[in-house]
Image (spheres, rainbow, N blue to C red):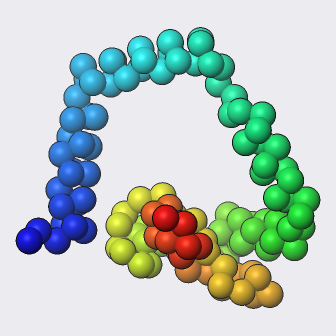
Amino acid sequence: MIDIQRQREIWRKASKKKREKPEYKAKEYKYYQEWYKKNGRNRSDDYLECILEWAQEHPDRVKVMGKLGRAVKSGKIKKPKTCENCGRETRLSGHHEDYSRPLEVIWLCSSCHKLRHGAT
């Protein structure tokens, strides 16, 4: 049986190779231009409403996330290139186990972050 993690990595590499081809990029560009004309570039109002509502309900967490962002931007905290859980090299976000310690985070990819929060 092939390890799922290994299989995902194989798929990612093949997919990345495909996306780097000029003809694929042109097709993708055309698709998104048409999509934006039809739907607009902005996220849905419901989505933005949810974010604003969450921010109003959790001002302490918003403040902590701001502190972390400023610390990364100033160089006080170095953001790693790989997920601390699975080792994947991708875009990462900081996960706070304890919001009373704003600069102590675990750097996770979106998949691992969702798992950490119990999403299925």
| Side of 11 where 94 appears, left or right | right
Q: Position of residue 80 (x, y in %)?
A: 48, 72
Q: Position of residue 4 (x, y in %)?
A: 22, 67
Q: Residue at x 75, y 68 (%)?
A: 65
Q: How many marks?
A: 0
The answer to whether one can see residue 48 in this image is: yes
Q: Position of residue 22 (x, y in %)?
A: 25, 23
Residue at the left extreme?
Answer: 1
In front here: 80 or 4?
4
Q: Quadrant of residue 106?
A: bottom right
| Side of 93 where 109 appears, left or right | left
Q: Residue at x 82, y 43 (%)?
A: 49
The vertical placement of 87 against 50, above or below, is: below
In front here: 71 or 6?
6
Q: Quadrant of residue 79?
A: bottom right
Q: Position of residue 85 (x, y in %)?
A: 42, 78
Q: Residue at x 89, y 64 (%)?
A: 57
Q: Residue at x 26, y 34 (%)?
A: 20
Q: Quadrant of the N terminus?
A: bottom left
The answer to whether one can see residue 108 in this image is: no
Residue at the front extreme?
Answer: 120
The vertical placement of 13 against 114, above or below, is: above
